[in-house]
Amino acid sequence: MKRELQLLNVMSALFVFALGLLGPIYATYVAGIGGDMITTGTAYSIFAIASGALTFLLSRWENRSKHKARIMMYGFALGCIGILGYLFVSNPLELFAVQLVLGIAAAIRMPLYDALYSTYLDKGKYTAEWGAWEALNLIVTGLSALLGGMIAEWYGFNTLFALMFAVSLIGFFMSAALPTKKPKKRPRK
């Protein structure tokens, strides 16, 4: 596996880990800021719809960009800001704003991540290398879910959010290590 793929896997795993820390206890968190099940659904809906709609629009522009790694890095940076925002949320409206920021960040980051990942795949190893990404993300999600519940229970949500931010920041700094030039095309056989 190429160095770039390894780096992309680690960056992705760090962000998946950071966000996965909150995943299974999200409804508990929302209840703690005065929300209910409708608030929880609305918050996730804001993230998903913003991310989906903007992914559709931005990916067409990003497809023509010569600076994919750099733009993806901005998506990672905005994701870090969104995660940091959880520390300052005190009511559902503020949570909705954080979810919107995270949705925009995902829309910037995800298509570029997939494009770059695809670019660095080794011929004949597509399934195995995409499988490595899928397996890593599922395992990391499981571990972060377990750890997130324990941290929130023992130390509280602010500690959890600080850890989420720190882990996502490491992912962001790793994104700066990606080559910013377009990779060379593989010769056709």
Image (spheres, helix red, strand yellow):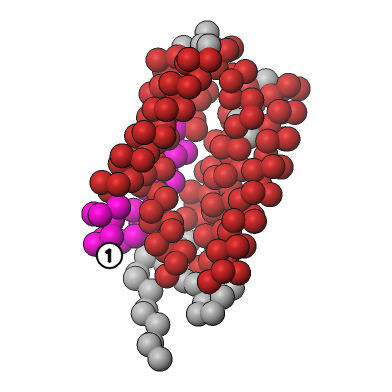
The C terminus sits in image quarter: bottom left
Q: What stretch is highlighted in magenta?
A: 59-82
Q: What element carries label 1?
A: loop
Quarter-of-image position of residue 102:
top left
> Is-magenta flag for residue 64?
yes
Main SS, magenta region, reads helix
| Residue identified by numbered label 1 | 66
Residue drawn 28% across and 60% down?
Answer: 63
Q: Position of residue 18 (x, y in %)?
A: 58, 39
The N terminus sits in image quarter: bottom right
Q: Is residue 14 above or below residue 46?
A: below
Query: Is 60 on the left or on the right of 181, as rendered?
Result: left
* Res 1 visible: yes
Residue type at tag 1 = Lys
> Is-magenta flag for residue 186?
no
Q: Is residue 52 above or below residue 1?
A: above
Query: Is 151 on the left or on the right of 63, as rendered?
Result: right
**Total number of numbered labels?**
1
* Res 3 visible: no
Q: Where is residue 125 in the image (x, y as percent from the top left)?
A: 56, 75
Q: Residue furthest top?
A: 34
Q: Is residue 89 above or below residue 57?
A: above
Q: Position of residue 74 (x, y in %)?
A: 37, 47
Camera-side residue: 174 or 13?
13
Q: In this view, does 27 lie above or below 165?
A: above
Camera-side residue: 79 or 23?
23
Residue drawn 27% across and 64% down?
Answer: 66
Residue drawn 34% across and 60% down?
Answer: 68
Q: Where is residue 86 in the image (x, y as percent from the top left)?
A: 50, 25
Camera-side residue: 157 or 32?
32
